[in-house]
Amino acid sequence: MQQAGVGYDQSHPNPTYGVANPGYMPTAEGAPAMFAPPAADFQGPSAPPASMFDSVPGYEGTVAGGGGFLPPPMPAYPVPQPQPGPQQPNWNIPCINEETAREAFALYASSKCCYSAAPAKDGVITGMEAFNTYRYRLETFTESRSTEWSHEPYNGQPVDAFAQPPPGPWDIPVKSPNFFVDDKQIIKVPYTSSMKSCHACVGMGRKPCKDCAGAGNKVCWVCNGSGYRHGDDRCHHCTGRGRENCNHCHGQGSKQCDTCHGKQQLLVYIKLTVKWTNNSDNYVVEQSSGLQLDNLSKVSGKELFKDSQYMVYPLMGFPDVAVVNAAQRLVNEHQGKFSQTSRILQQRQTIELIPVTKVTYSWKGKSHIYFVYGNEFKVNAENYPATCCCAIM
């Protein structure tokens, strides 16, 4: 049986939506043309109403606009237990030399338009002290799945709803992800697709033009609907009709439906969204140099330790007890937090040693300090002694 609305001739819009009217009657002499009534709000709902959705076994809670995250099923096999990682004997590195500290300071000064190069060039380094610190990072790579009803214009796609029970949300195969890289995949759930009349245009394929309220024409802006200009001079813009074709709908009075693209029918189906997320937390050991920890967030350090497996084991035998405590806390937090709403695929923990050197130097008889930190030899000198004020004209 032919579906309702199929075979609709789009070249002849439904008369209730307004039609092209090429032969306007001239307005009565001296009487202005009537303004079209205000356009009604013809915008349909943003998604099909709930009555359009069929209850699909295993997806009863799915709604338009998102059905929420789906907790993963319990594994049918024993979860592999984490193993202690290897121990690393070298937990420290020496501070940078004086030449490196001076070059980093000179490069820093040259990057500031208001800084004189004199302190970096002529200052005498009087002391260097290492305040190297550790950064512990825990990454938990997870997979989460969510479902929602979706739709698209019907162009002859397969309709398979109720042909057989659809697979469960966590039973649908997906591509193999790259560990620790955020990604997303959207899948049309098999055996959930059905064809429905478009809710936005009620299956007509067109919607009334809001600009002309479906009339196809508007009051002439040149003569304000009178049909005349300067006494008895007939308006050339509207040829005396007082109205002109609507530019938005080209005189049709209606426009193609944006939801179904004029197809009148929609393919309605359940959409599965699979997200892979790298959840990362850092802990940096407080150091007493005076350099704020925020400065260390954008620099790298020397990697001392890396351990990657399905579930990592908290650190053991590390010489800094603050790092050990932070690792145990973050491992417990990640396992408790992410296993409830997603599937943990892999974890990775690393320790970096971030070099921090406090440099004391003398310039013009006064003592000053700056910091060189990270593998990038970034510099922090909050109280640079030779700055000028730049005014933008």
Image: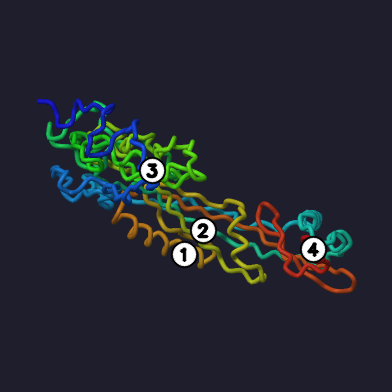
Which residue reaches farthest left?
A: 1
3D distance between C-alphas at marks 2 and 3: 86 Å
User: Residue sitting at 72 percent across and 68 percent down?
Assistant: 382
The numbered disc on residue 326 is 1
Image colouring: rainbow
Q: Is residue 1 left or right of residue 388?
A: left
Which is nearer the eye, 241 or 36? 241
Q: Residue 152 placed where, x, y %?
A: 28, 36
Label 3: few (<14), some or many (≥20) within 10 Å?
A: few
Which residue is under mark 3? Answer: 29
3D distance between C-alphas at marks 4 and 1: 45 Å
User: Residue sitting at 85 percent across and 74 percent down?
Assistant: 366
The amino acid at mark 4 is Cys
Q: Residue 361 placed where, x, y %?
A: 82, 67
Task: Tell me the SS state at disc 3.
Answer: loop
First-in-chain label (2 vs 3): 3
Answer whether labels 2 and 1 touch (C-beta < 8 Å): yes
3D distance between C-alphas at marks 4 and 3: 70 Å
The amino acid at mark 3 is Glu
Which residue is under mark 2? Answer: 136
Q: Which is closer to the viewer, label 4 or label 1?
A: 4
Q: Which is closer to the viewer, label 2 or label 3?
A: 3
Answer whether labels 2 and 3 touch (C-beta < 8 Å): no
User: Residue sitting at 66 percent across and 65 percent down?
Assistant: 131
Q: Which is closer to the viewer, label 1 or label 3?
A: 3
User: Is residue 224 shown to the viewer in this render?
Assistant: yes
User: Is residue 346 shown to the viewer in this render?
Assistant: no
Which residue is under mark 4? Answer: 390
Task: Tell me the SS state at disc 4.
Answer: loop
The amino acid at mark 1 is Ala
